[in-house]
Image (cartoon, rainbow, N blue to C red):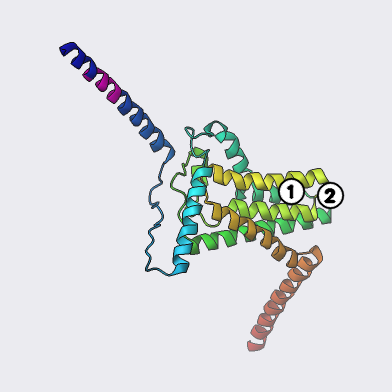
């Protein structure tokens, strides 16, 4: 009797101990993957029936956005379900960053051989600067915090983004893709590669839990519309030369007028 009771208690203790150990490992795993940066607060999704129907609808859509973004963040850390391909996804993400694009475009502009190439690269540089300015402005106005499961590493910490909306990678990918499709791509295979790259860059932001789905969706639409503005404000070498000559002539006239007034005074 005593041995049977002792055996049952020991089995319960073993089962309880194994359950506690598994829960501890699960908590450790979740704590690694759900790294919350300092200052980031979870979004408030509380809903009251006394609120207007528009507010309830927006909060419902926001809840779907948060849930879908969390499900897509399968490369948020090494312990995630697709954590093994995280370095490859980070490489794709880096290919859409502003710094390599601006530096590479400026270098190509300085090394351009023909006036046509330099004109295209000049407008691409201006388009990248315009995209960077508009994205920074919207991020400062909206101030949406980055996803809580986002985990910064050594490389991404150097280019850390404080706010999430809109996704700068998505705007840049859409704008550059449309730019290349309109100006440089002339074969079906090249068009496929350009479109595929823009889709992969946008998707990498979701897989790494850098942005929400709405951030990426709005960024793609914004980048698509930005090229229309770039195309409307296209800068030619002749127009740039005339503008610079006009500015220079105004400066010379102002300087000559000032010298003439000084001589007249004396």
Q: Nearer the viewer, mark 1 or mark 2?
A: 2
- The location of residue 235, given as percent across then percent down, is 75, 64
Image quadrant occupied by the N terminus: top left
Left or right relative to 52: residue 1 = left
Q: Is residue 14 magenta?
A: yes
Is 243 situated above or below 256? above
Left or right relative to 234: residue 140 = left
Image quarter of residue 36: top left
Q: Residues within 10 Å of mark 2 (few under 14, many from 20)?
A: few
Image quarter of residue 243: bottom right
Q: Which residues are magenta?
A: 9-17
Is 129 situated above or below 263? above
Left or right relative to 44: residue 135 = right
- The location of residue 62, given as percent across then percent down, is 48, 57
User: Residue furthest toward the front?
Assistant: 1
**Residue 129 shows in the view:** no
Instruction: Tell me the number on the disc at residue 264.
Output: none
Instruction: Tell me the number on the disc at residue 186.
Output: 2
Tag 1 residue:
108
Residue under the image location 40 percent in, 33 percent down: 29
Circle nearer the N terminus (1, 2) = 1
Image quadrant occupied by the C terminus: bottom right
Q: CA distance from mark 1 to mark 2?
A: 20 Å
Q: Residues within 10 Å of mark 1 (few under 14, many from 20)?
A: some
Is 248 situated above or below 193? below
């Amino acid at each position: 009797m005593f041995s049977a009771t002792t055996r049952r208690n020991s089995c319960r203790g073993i089962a309880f101990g194994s359950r506690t150990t598994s829960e501890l490992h699960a908590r450790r795993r979740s704590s690694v993957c759900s790294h919350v940066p300092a200052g980031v607060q979870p979004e408030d999704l509380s809903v009251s029936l006394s609120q207007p129907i528009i507010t309830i609808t927006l909060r419902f859509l926001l809840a779907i956005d948060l849930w879908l973004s969390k499900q897509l963040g399968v490369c948020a850390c090494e312990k995630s379900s697709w954590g093994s391909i995280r370095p490859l996804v980070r490489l794709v993400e880096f290919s859409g960053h502003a710094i390599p694009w601006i530096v590479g475009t400026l270098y190509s502009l300085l090394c351009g051989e023909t006036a046509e190439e330099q004109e295209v690269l000049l407008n691409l540089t201006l388009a990248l600067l315009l995209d960077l300015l508009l994205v920074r402005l919207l991020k400062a106005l909206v101030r949406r915090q980055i996803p809580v499961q986002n985990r910064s590493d050594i490389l991404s910490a150097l280019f850390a983004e404080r706010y999430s909306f809109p996704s700068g990678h998505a705007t840049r990918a859409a704008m550059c893709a449309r730019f290349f499709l309109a100006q440089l791509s002339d074969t079906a295979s090249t068009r496929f590669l350009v479109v595929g790259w823009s889709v992969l860059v946008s998707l990498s932001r979701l897989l790494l839990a850098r942005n929400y789905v709405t951030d990426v969706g709005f960024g793609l639409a914004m980048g698509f519309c930005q090229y229309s503005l770039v195309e409307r404000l296209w800068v030619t070498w002749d127009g740039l030369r005339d503008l610079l000559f006009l500015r220079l002539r105004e400066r010379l006239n102002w300087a000559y007028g000032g010298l003439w007034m000084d001589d007249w005074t004396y």
